[in-house]
Image (tube, helix red, strand yellow):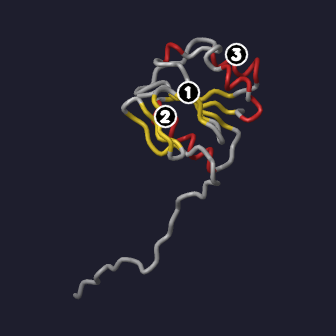
Amino acid sequence: MARRQLREPDISLDITPLIPAGRQLIRGYGDGKFRIAETQHDGSVLVFADETLAWPVARWEDVTMDSLTPILDRAAEARLLLIGCGPAFVLPPRGLKKALKDDHGIVLEWMDTGAACRTFNVLLAEERAAAAALVAV
C-alpha cells in the first residue's frame, strides 16, 4: 500500500484582525514594561482604545476607586473594565466590583495581567467599549 505524502497548502490565510490605525494594541509586556501601539511604557498603565496613560499603581493592593479616576472620567467609553492584577490571579478588593457597577455602570473583569492584555486586544478588535488597567509585571 502506497503512502500519500502530505503537502503544504498553496495558500495562506492571515487571521490577524484588522486594527484601525492609532488603536492601542498591546504587543508585549514584562520586565515592568508594556509595548502598546509601538510605544514602550514603563510601569503600570491605563489603556483606552485610543490612548495609553501612566498609572501610579505598583501592586494589586493599590487598586482603589481613587486610582481608577481616569477610567471613571471616561466611563462612556469604558463600559467594561479589565484589571490585570499582576503576575497571578488574586481576588479583587472587597466592594470594588459593586461600586464600579452601581455608581458608574462599569462592569469589572479582574484577572492576571497577561490574561487582561490578551482579552483587551480581542475587545479592541471587536470595537467594544472597554478599557484596561494593567499592573506591570
The residue that label 3 is drawn on is 99
Task: Classify 1 as above or below 64.
Answer: below
Amino acid type, mark 1: Ala
Residue 50 drawn above or below residue 55: below
The quadrant holding residue 75 is top right
Q: Residue 41: give its label.
A: 2
Residue at figure coordinates x 64%, y 54% from the top left: 20
- Compute the Cα span from label 3 to label 1: 23 Å
| Helix, strand or loop status at disc 1 | strand
Question: Which quadrant of the figure contains the N terminus?
Answer: bottom left
Q: Which mark is residue 54?
A: 1
Element marked by disc 2: strand
Left or right: residue 101 versus residue 84 is right
Q: Tag 2: Cα neighbours inside 10 Å, few (<14), some, or many (≥20)?
A: some
Q: Given this view, does label 2 or label 3 mark the residue nearer the observer?
A: 2
Q: How crowded is the residue under tag 3: few (<14 C-alpha within 10 Å), some, or many (20+)?
A: some
Q: Residue at x 46, y 19 (%)?
A: 58
Q: Earlier in the sequence, mark 1 or mark 2?
A: 2
Measured in 3D between alpha carbons, the distance from the residue under mark 1 to the one under mark 2, in whole angstroms, is: 8 Å
**Circles 1 and 2 in contact, beta carbons < 8 Å:** yes
